[in-house]
Image (tube, helix red, strand yellow):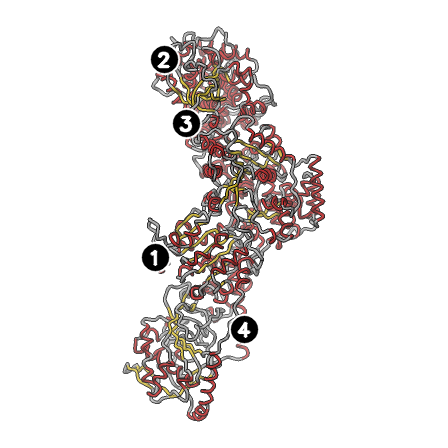
């Protein structure tokens, strides 16, 4: 049985499924409800929470529930009607398209029939076919549905733009009403329209002539409609439902009226022709179908001058099926309108009819005269309507709203009146004018604004995944996107305009994608208005655009249409009514208002004047900065001299001004309006903390050029969260905006883009770029790599200018949150300001005074919480009591409170985190059922009182995207504590992970997921300003400490599953397990992570760490006596670890953007620990002499002890490779440290010893030395030396003795120079040299041994220049020449030694020798190549050159001065010594100048050169911008690094008379 014949409570799942399909619910949700076994009774009980729980989106839920309610209301009404009486209606057979096929045709009440030609076909019968699964394309509509009403075409209207919408309904058929108002009659004509020409025409003429006769006899206007359902009995259709008919040939219908001459009396045929107007074909449009259908309408107009005193009897044509001919009825009949029907006048009523004829004629004349009178139309107040539509009736517009403009061709005359568009914040334009760039709107707009042009497919296909801020890289929020929707005539590529049908077929899909992307992913709801500007005749694609926006935005609340031409609007509205009723469209449209009036009206509503903005120039004047130029510099937020002066102050109410002030004191970031209002005395002064004065003084010092003259200077502000650091930075900018060019950097753009814009900003409107004003750039909450890359980009760009300026080109004011700002300030005191919660006495007084003033303005402390807490210096007890007071009566079970806890969890553990307003609304269920009456929507009004005080709503400055966070992280901490009760935080996080509403909300999803990831993964690092370095995220560490590690593991597992099985969560699980000695589980999770990312060096290192920890645990913690099996097991675990670390090493080499050396350190640590363990195995016990002869013999020869020969099996070959593997790793680490040894490595020397991991990080040289000694200890055996004499084993053991004595590698040897006891180091070096052959020229050393041998001499010469062990420099040169002549590759240290030994020496190189230059050139080129290979693509700041030696004033080895010797001549703490190196003040120390030699060189195009023996060499300057511009003779100190020669303290030579010997 058809579900439509059943009451809802009798429906099964199939019936519900059919109904859901019929109302347009998406297929995926229909299937979900079917799976959930939603029957009729269940449908009646469905609510929002259930539907949301199965994943339905808000719009679909809203529609389902509304349609369900309408269905139930209709059913109830029908039941009430049927219980009282059953309605009957003798409908015309022709209008009954759903009569059973074999049912006999009924006759009209008059007995006349137009024949059987209109028998319904099976296609139109809803009872045919499957009852439960009706096609969605079926024309049938359930009678239970409430269809939308539609207006009839205006009488006698020939407007071809007028359309009907399929399945809407017209008002019921009507009788006579005032004669001028037409009566209406409906005919389905569904079957007749498919008949042949004769049948169709006879049927059509029959209906028209009968209806016309009735109207003309009664003297009333009328319209008969074909294609409109008139059956009231049929359950499948509604009376008046618009279906339309297929029209094969229009002439069939026009020619059908030729029956007039056959059917009317000859005397009235001409009159009938004039009264019966030709058919009008009104198109029926449908969103679901492209099939073309029409409603055919004939208007009857019996004007009194034509019909007076006349009657109209007619024959009716009938088609005879037998003869297949058309015949006329036997007798003529008079028809009249009786109610809504055309019925024949019975014989006994004829007299009465004739008697009333004159009266009817008189009434007709009177009616015509009345209708002809001119009625003055009262014009609408369109100005007020425009104000209401654009800004809710306020006196000025909301600048935070963005506009999406949809428009078509703009004629030349109209271009004069679109100036208002230049002042709107237009996000993008959908332009359907292919000539727009040549002569249309785009040509005018781009004169005033920077834009980016797209075609539909480009804009819609931009990447939606990957980078979470992808839209920012498109400049979407900084430059207007101009989308050419139908090609561009002047474009040389293949993108030409096309006709409507081609556009629908080829481009409509891209339009849909683009609009969906904007509404779902880029702009939040209620943040933009779609403005349709109809400037020329409308085509279908423009209407499609409306329909897509209407669907995505759930209505017209934020859609406005402006059309000066009523005709253009009419066509647009008639087509658009397929989605939205004409009445609704009229409510959101401004029609008939001249464009010039629209232009002026909107400009008057703008909140700011259109005055130009100005910048300072070097001549102390001003220059204008037009919007076009400013928008080109989209990566900078430019602060002008007259910032905010364009705001119409008189439009701001006191309440609005107070709100601006309060927002700041509640915790929002300060905005320029705060300073401006304070300057205008419209709000209180902003407190200036002492740190602001400090920052200003540092800035003055930088501008005066004190210290080194850098082209790019840095001024750093580190601040506690909420202490006002950002305010101080902006105060400095505000105060200096008149004498410097100031801007804020948008870090969403690349450093290269920012650099390009910063240079253009500096040069803008300046006559001489050498005398431009410095540019002060604020960068906030930056990444260190980003800052360093930006600084280098700026320095390189300045260097190419070849200009030397007495002041910096750029000053980067770096403002960043830190939990320990004082420590960071202490590390760099000359350019850093620390801002803490601690107030000075004078600041306390200022804050107290300000608080009293705010209270006097009736500002409650609850609404300026952040400021109140700052007054109390964020005292822990005060914060606790304050939060406790606020939360006193809170409803702990409410959604508000739940949201508060979630936000607090993120805010406390994840710096700078927030939750988008869209997420909050989705979580709280706002905006699902309610239709907004006003755009003045206030999210806070839906919150509890406590939540309103705790939350602060933030707006991103460029995108205006709103988000929510707790007013301060310390308040978030207290909320977590006080609202948790007995519930642990792990449980709160687990509940958060199960909130599908938050994770499935599409808008702002990337940022939300990032914060969730950071909650579980982001560790604290001191280098980022955190208090400590943590092993895990602070949240995971808290759970482990306050609860237990099992809870931490459980919540991490849940996060792993929820976030798409993220391999880095699996890595964290592996680390968490091995740190808690759960090694089997750790092994499993490391394998899981590795299966996702098999070539990630960090994950492979974690796998190695699992086995390293496991091995250490089994060795340390096992108390029972080792069995042979347990020994083998331990060895296997250690070898597994080493294998994993070697895999990590190989993976790290392939990674271009990182330098992960952990695999080498891990392999050495495990290898050395394995050696120690092997030494404890009985078979390798120590000899009485204290040596491990058996172990050494086993490891370096083919010898295998009998006891383990079989049991250890395959382990032998792997253990015998242990020595070489460890040696390779130690050598790599040594070479690596040669590049990267920095002062950081000394940092912990003066503190207590840390664990091995700390030592590896903070003092890797010491770690390397210690591990080398451990390694060497197990490969030394006197007995083996005696047995092998001078064999390879003997040489190996001698090398091990060198290792044990502290030599053996470059880094170990150089570390002797850092020993505070130089004599002890010199003795050790002499002992090491004693292990080498006495005549190295004769007895050839291996390459690495020769490198170490030469370096020992150089190091010893630095420590004890008079040592008897030292060889002459010339001998060392002869030894090292092998590195130049050899064909095989040598390590970087070999080429480094060549640069030291072959640099020109006045004692050794009395005659110039070009061959020595060749050695130097070769060495320097190879060093550069190896350095570039080593560095890969790592961030710039990690490429810092480390200089080992400097050129001194001596000769031979005496001219080589190590950096530590200079360090010892610098007084002060480690941080102070660092700063002296950084700022170049070390060169002012006389004792340093006395030992180093200044050499001469020259500059050319900002490149530095020096002469060697005869040829010139390029030199790397320590700071690129220290190289003077132009071509200058310079002097400098020369350093030697693994990246070649380095110049320090470059100065232009001021005394040209000084002779300069070659090579120095």
Residues at marks 4 and 2 touching, judged by CB atoms closer than 8 Å:
no
Query: Mark 3 sits on what residue?
Result: 1501
The correct choice, above or below, for 1217 with respect to 53 in the image is: above
Using the image as rendered, state which of residue 1304 and residue 456 is in the foreground: 456
The correct choice, above or below, for 1275 with respect to 1126 in the image is: above
Q: Of the residues tagged 3 and 4, which is closer to the observer?
A: 3
What is the quadrant of residue 1384 in the picture?
top left
Quarter the C terminus occupies: top left
Using the image as rendered, state which of residue 86 and residue 1157 is in the foreground: 1157
Q: Give the Cα separation between the discs numbered 1 and 2.
A: 76 Å
Sooner in the amino-acid sequence: mark 4 or mark 1:
4
Circle on res. 77? 4
Q: Give the Cα separation between the discs numbered 3 and 4.
A: 91 Å
Circle on res. 498? 1
Secondary structure of the residue carrying numbered label 4: helix
Residue at 61 percent of width and 23 percent of height = 1248
Q: Residues within 10 Å of mark 4 (few under 14, many from 20)?
A: few
The correct choice, above or below, for 558 with respect to 167 in the image is: above
Spot occupied by residue 162 in the image (x, y as percentages of width and height): 42, 69
Sooner in the amino-acid sequence: mark 3 or mark 1:
1
Secondary structure of the residue carrying numbered label 2: loop
Spot occupied by residue 435 in the image (x, y as percentages of width and height): 37, 54
What is the quadrant of residue 433 in the picture?
bottom left
Q: Of the residues tagged 4 and 2, which is closer to the observer?
A: 2
Spot occupied by residue 1092 in the image (x, y as percentages of width and height): 45, 39
Q: Is residue 36 visible?
A: no
Residues at marks 3 and 1 touching, judged by CB atoms closer than 8 Å:
no
Spot occupied by residue 1194 in the image (x, y as percentages of width and height): 44, 18
Q: Give the Cα separation between the discs numbered 4 and 1.
A: 51 Å
Query: Mark 2 sits on what residue?
Result: 1409
């Amino acid at each position: 049985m058809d579900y439509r014949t059943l009451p809802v409570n009798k429906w099964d799942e199939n019936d519900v499924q059919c109904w859901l399909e019929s109302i347009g619910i998406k297929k995926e949700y229909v299937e979900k409800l079917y799976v959930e076994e939603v029957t009729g009774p269940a449908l009646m009980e469905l609510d929002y929470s259930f539907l949301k729980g199965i994943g339905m989106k808000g719009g679909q839920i809203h529609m389902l529930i509304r349609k369900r309610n309408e269905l139930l209301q209709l059913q109830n009404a029908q039941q009430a009607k049927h219980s009282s009486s059953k309605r009957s209606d003798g409908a015309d057979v022709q209008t009954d398209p759903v009569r059973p096929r074999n049912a006999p045709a009924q006759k009209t009440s008059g007995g006349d029939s137009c024949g059987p030609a209109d028998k319904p076909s099976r296609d139109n019968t809803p009872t045919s076919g499957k009852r439960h699964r009706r096609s969605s394309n079926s024309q049938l509509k359930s009678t239970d549905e409430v269809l939308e009403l539609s207006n009839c075409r205006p009488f006698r209207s020939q407007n071809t733009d007028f359309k009907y919408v399929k399945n809407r309904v017209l008002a019921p058929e009507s009788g006579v009403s005032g004669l001028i108002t037409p009566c209406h009659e409906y005919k389905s004509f569904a079957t007749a329209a498919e008949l042949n020409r004769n049948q169709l025409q006879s049927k059509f003429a029959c209906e028209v002539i009968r209806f016309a006769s009735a109207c003309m006899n009664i003297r009333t206007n009328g319209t008969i409609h074909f294609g409109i359902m008139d059956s009231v009995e049929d359950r499948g259709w509604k009376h008046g439902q618009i279906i339309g008919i297929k029209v094969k040939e229009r002439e069939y219908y026009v020619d059908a009226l030729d029956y007039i001459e056959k059917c009317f009396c000859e005397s009235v045929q001409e009159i009938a022709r004039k009264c019966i107007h030709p058919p009008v074909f009104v198109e029926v449009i449908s969103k679901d179908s492209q099939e073309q259908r029409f409603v055919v309408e004939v208007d009857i107009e019996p004007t009194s001058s034509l019909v007076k005193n006349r009657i109209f009897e007619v024959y009716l044509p009938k088609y005879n099926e037998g003869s297949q001919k058309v015949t006329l009825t036997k007798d003529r009949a008079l028809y009249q309108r009786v109610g809504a029907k055309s019925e024949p006048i019975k014989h006994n009523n004829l007299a009465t009819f004739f008697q009333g004829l004159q009266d009817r004629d008189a009434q007709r004349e009177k009616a015509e005269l009345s209708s002809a009178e001119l009625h003055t139309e009262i014009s609408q107040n369109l100005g007020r309507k425009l104000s209401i539509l654009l800004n809710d009736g306020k006196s000025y517009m909301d600048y935070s709203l963005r506009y999406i403009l949809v428009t078509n061709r703009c004629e030349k005359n109209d271009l004069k009146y679109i100036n208002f568009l230049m002042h709107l914040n237009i996000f993008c334009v959908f332009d359907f004018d292919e000539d727009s760039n040549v002569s249309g709107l785009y040509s005018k707009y781009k004169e005033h604004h920077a834009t980016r042009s797209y075609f539909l497919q480009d804009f819609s296909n931009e990447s939606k995944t990957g980078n979470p801020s992808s839209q920012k890289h498109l400049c979407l929020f900084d430059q207007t996107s101009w989308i050419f929707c139908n090609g561009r005539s002047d474009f040389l590529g293949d993108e030409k305009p096309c006709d409507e049908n081609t556009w629908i077929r080829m481009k409509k899909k891209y339009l849909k994608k683009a609009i969906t992307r904007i509404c779902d992913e880029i702009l939040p709801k209620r943040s933009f208005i779609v403005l349709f500007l109809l400037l020329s005749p409308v085509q279908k694609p423009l209407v499609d655009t409306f329909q897509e926006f209407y669907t995505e935005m759930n209505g017209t609340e934020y859609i406005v249409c402006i059309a000066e031409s009523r005709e253009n609007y009419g066509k647009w509205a008639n087509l658009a009514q397929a989605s939205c009723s004409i009445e609704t469209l009229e409510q959101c449209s401004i029609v008939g208002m001249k464009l010039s009036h629209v232009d002026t009206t909107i400009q008057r509503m703008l909140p700011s004047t259109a005055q130009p903005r100005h910048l300072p120039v070097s001549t102390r004047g001003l220059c204008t900065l037009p919007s076009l130029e400013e928008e080109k510099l989209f990566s900078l937020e430019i602060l002008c001299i007259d910032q905010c002066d364009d705001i119409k102050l008189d439009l701001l109410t006191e309440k609005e001004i107070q709100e601006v002030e309060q927002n700041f004191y509640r915790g929002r970031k300060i905005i320029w309006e705060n300073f401006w209002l304070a300057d205008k005395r419209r709000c209180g002064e902003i407190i200036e903390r002492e740190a602001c004065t400090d920052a200003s003084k540092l800035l003055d010092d930088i501008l005066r050029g004190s210290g080194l003259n850098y082209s790019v200077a840095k001024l750093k502000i580190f601040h506690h969260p909420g202490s006002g650091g950002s305010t101080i930075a902006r105060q400095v900018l505000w105060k200096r905006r008149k004498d410097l060019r100031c801007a804020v950097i948008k870090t969403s753009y690349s450093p290269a883009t920012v650099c390009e814009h910063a240079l253009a900003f500096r040069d803008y409107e300046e006559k001489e770029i050498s005398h431009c004003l410095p540019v002060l750039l604020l960068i906030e909450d930056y990444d260190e790599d980003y800052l360093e890359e930006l600084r280098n980009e700026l320095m390189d760009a300045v260097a190419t200018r070849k200009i030397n300026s007495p002041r910096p080109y750029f000053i980067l004011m770096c403002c960043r949150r830190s939990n320990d700002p004082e420590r960071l300030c202490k590390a760099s005191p000359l350019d850093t300001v620390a801002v803490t919660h601690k107030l000075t006495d004078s600041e306390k007084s200022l804050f107290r005074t300000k608080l009293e003033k705010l209270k006097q303005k009736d500002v409650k402390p609850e609404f300026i919480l952040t400021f109140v807490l700052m007054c109390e210096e964020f005292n822990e007890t005060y914060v606790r009591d304050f939060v406790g007071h606020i939360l006193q009566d809170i409803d702990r079970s409410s959604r508000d409170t739940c949201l508060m806890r979630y936000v607090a969890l993120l805010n406390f553990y994840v710096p700078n985190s927030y939750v988008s307003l869209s997420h909050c609304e989705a979580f709280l269920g706002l905006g699902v059922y309610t239709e907004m009456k006003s755009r003045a929507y206030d999210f806070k009004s839906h919150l509890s009182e406590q939540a309103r005080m705790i939350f602060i709503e933030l707006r991103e400055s460029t995108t205006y995207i709103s988000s929510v966070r707790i007013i301060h992280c310390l308040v978030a901490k207290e909320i977590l504590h006080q609202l948790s009760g007995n519930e642990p935080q792990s449980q709160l996080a687990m509940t958060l992970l199960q909130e599908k509403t938050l994770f499935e909300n599409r808008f702002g999803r990337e940022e939300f997921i990032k914060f969730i990831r950071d909650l579980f993964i982001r560790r604290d690092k001191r280098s980022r300003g955190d208090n400590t370095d943590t092993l895990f995220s602070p949240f995971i560490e808290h759970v482990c400490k306050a609860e237990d590690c099992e809870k931490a593991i459980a919540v991490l597992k849940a996060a792993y599953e929820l976030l798409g099985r993220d391999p880095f969560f699996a890595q964290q699980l592996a680390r968490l397990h091995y740190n808690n000695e759960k090694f089997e589980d750790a092994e499993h999770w490391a394998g899981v992570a590795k299966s996702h990312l098999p070539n990630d060096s960090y994950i492979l290192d974690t796998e190695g760490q699992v086995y390293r920890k496991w091995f250490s645990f089994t060795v340390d913690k096992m108390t029972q006596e080792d069995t042979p099996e347990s020994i083998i097991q331990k060895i296997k675990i250690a070898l597994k670890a080493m294998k994993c670390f070697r895999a990590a090493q190989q993976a790290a080499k392939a990674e271009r953007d990182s330098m992960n050396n952990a695999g080498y350190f891990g392999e050495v640590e495990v290898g050395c620990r394995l050696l120690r363990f092997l030494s404890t195995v009985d078979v390798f016990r120590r000899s009485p002499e204290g040596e491990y002869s058996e172990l050494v013999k086993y490891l370096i020869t083919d010898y295998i002890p009998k006891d383990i020969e079989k049991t250890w099996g395959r382990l032998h070959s792997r253990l015998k490779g242990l020595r070489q593997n460890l040696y390779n790793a130690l050598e790599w680490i040594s070479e690596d440290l040669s590049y990267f040894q920095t002062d950081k490595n000394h940092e912990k020397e003066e503190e207590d010893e840390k664990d091995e991991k700390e030592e590896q990080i903070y003092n890797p040289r010491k770690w390397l030395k210690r591990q080398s000694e451990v390694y060497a200890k197990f490969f030394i055996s006197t007995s083996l030396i005696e047995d092998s004499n001078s064999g390879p084993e003997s040489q190996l053991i001698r090398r091990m003795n060198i290792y044990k004595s502290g030599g053996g590698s470059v880094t170990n040897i150089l570390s002797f120079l850092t020993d505070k006891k130089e004599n002890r180091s010199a003795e050790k070096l002499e002992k090491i040299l004693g292990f080498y052959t006495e005549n190295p020229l004769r007895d050839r050393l291996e390459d690495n041994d020769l490198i170490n041998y030469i370096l020992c001499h150089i190091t010893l010469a630095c420590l004890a220049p008079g040592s008897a062990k030292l060889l002459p420099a010339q001998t060392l040169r002869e030894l090292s020449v092998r590195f130049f002549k050899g064909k095989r590759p040598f390590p970087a240290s070999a080429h480094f030694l060549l640069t030291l030994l072959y640099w020109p020496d006045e004692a050794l190189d009395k005659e110039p020798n070009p061959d020595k230059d060749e050695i130097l050139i070769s060495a320097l080129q190879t060093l550069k190549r190896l350095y570039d290979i080593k560095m890969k693509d790592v961030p710039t700041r990690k490429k810092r050159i480390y200089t080992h030696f400097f050129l001194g004033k001596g000769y031979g080895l005496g001219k080589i001065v190590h950096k530590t010797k200079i360090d010892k001549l610098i007084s002060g703490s480690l941080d102070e010594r660092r700063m002296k190196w950084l700022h170049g003040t070390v060169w002012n120390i006389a004792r340093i100048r006395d030992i180093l030699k200044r050499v001469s060189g020259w500059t050319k195009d900002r490149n530095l050169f020096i002469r060697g023996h005869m040829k010139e060499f390029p030199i790397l300057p320590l700071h690129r911008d220290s190289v003077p511009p132009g071509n200058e003779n310079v002097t400098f100190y020369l350093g030697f690094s693994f990246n070649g020669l380095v110049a320090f303290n470059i100065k232009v030579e001021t005394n040209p008379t000084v002779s300069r010997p070659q090579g120095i």
